[in-house]
Amino acid sequence: MGMLVIVASLVAFVGGLWVGTLTADIRLPFTGSGPLPVLDEAWTLVTEEFYGELPPAASLNRAAVRGLLESLQDPYTVLLDPELAQQEQQRLSGRYGSVGVSLWWAEKDVVALTPYAEGPATAAGVRDGDRLIAIDGTRLAAGASLEDVAAQLEGAVGTSVTLALLREPGEGEFTLTLTRAEVLQPSVEWRMIEGTDAIGYLRIRLFTVQTPVEAPQAVEALLQQGARALVLDLRGNGGGMVADLDAIAGVFLPAGETLYYDVSESEEREIQVSGAQLFTGPLMVLVDQATASTAEILAAALYDHHRTLLIGAPTYGKSSIQALYPLKDGSLLHVTHAVWLTPARNRLDGVGLTPDIAVEPRPGADQALQTAIEQLMAD
């Protein structure tokens, strides 16, 4: 069968992912001698003696595989059902039911919108910087997180949502009704930060197949708008595709620098940064407890090469890399096959990265971003 290209993990955090091909197909009931004779024997007895209806063969197959995987005691070596495997493909391709906007704090408790170039919000007339006042007649609660607001905007394709917006201070509110559609969500968002002297903002939500193209394009656009300093936001980024991370890191680091070490049972490989360094100016990186795996690789590389300070909260701490194998029934097998070390040869499992400046989040405001801005303006 062909190689599955777009994959991720919905279990805990998505890691650095490699894609493999099917090498074996386990089918139940087992017959004859094999590598698991006790399982063979036990299942033969169950099929002969069990009082009741046996589950479908597909369910039995997956249950047997999960039982075998549990014995490894590795939370990242798992089997995903076909439905979850399909959701992964959609997630890493960036497609889901949405109105097509990114959210940001314009000021305390004031959420602003940036519409995607193509999507329901742009088609309905939403403009960059419009303030979001209410959703379906319910005003935004004070202290609501951006994640809570985003969840209200997402939904099934074809359903509608009504937004109350404010465009200019002193003007009245107006409403727009948008129909959710399957939107190609960019893996990055970017903007110049209001009220600052040439500071750009770049957030990478998840490392998808789009990120190697989108991240350099975003930085080039910020440079064209006069950005001389940059905030890189990796908060909430659980990882994703590790392929092409060397080129993404090359936006911020010189080619040839060590990105990370890939260590398996049989070998160790030094993964180096590639590409042309686009941004050489001052840089601050935002991290939190949901920054994991591939996002931690990038943050650690920037930190170990003395390229940035880390601001926020300690990161998740995941140093394993999973190979992914699509199985014949549409399920997806994740197998931990290597660990990664930072350029300083640190392993982060259960430890994570400790920020240089710890910042406690405040409801209705982005204190970590404000701290990063203050650091850049003080330099």
Image: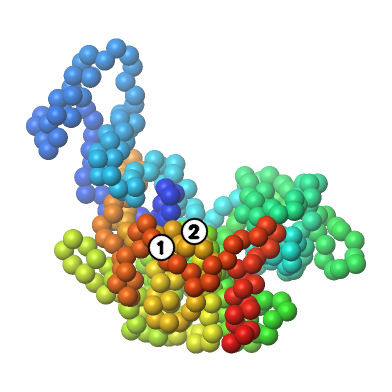
- Mark positioned earlier in the residue sequence (1 or 2): 2
> In the shown orientation, is residue 164 left or right of residue 271?
right
> Does 289 appear above or below 151?
below
> Does 280 appear above or below 82?
below
Q: Quadrant of residue 295?
A: bottom left
Q: Secondary structure at mark 2?
A: loop
> In the shown orientation, is residue 238 left or right of residue 184?
left
Q: Which mark is residue 352?
A: 1
Which of these two is toward me, 196 or 203? Answer: 196
Residue positioned 39% across, 77% down in the render: 304
Residue positioned 81% across, 46% down in the render: 137
Q: Quadrant of residue 175?
A: bottom right
Residue 360 x, y percent position in the rendering: 59, 62
Q: Secondary structure at mark 1?
A: loop
Task: Say which amino acid is labelled 1.
Answer: Gly
The crowd level at tag 1 (other Cα within 10 Å; few <14, some 14-19, many 20+) is many
Residue 117 visible (yes or no) = yes
Judged from this view, the residue extending furthest toward the left is: 33
> Label 2: which residue?
289
Q: Quadrant of residue 366?
A: bottom right
Residue 8 x, y percent position in the rendering: 41, 54
Q: Which mark is residue 312?
A: none
| Residue contact between numbered discs 1 and 2, judged by CB atoms under 8 Å | yes
Task: Say which amino acid is labelled 2.
Answer: Gln
Residue 241 visible (yes or no) = no
Residue 214 x, y percent position in the rendering: 52, 72
State the CA–CA distance, disc 1 to disc 2.
9 Å
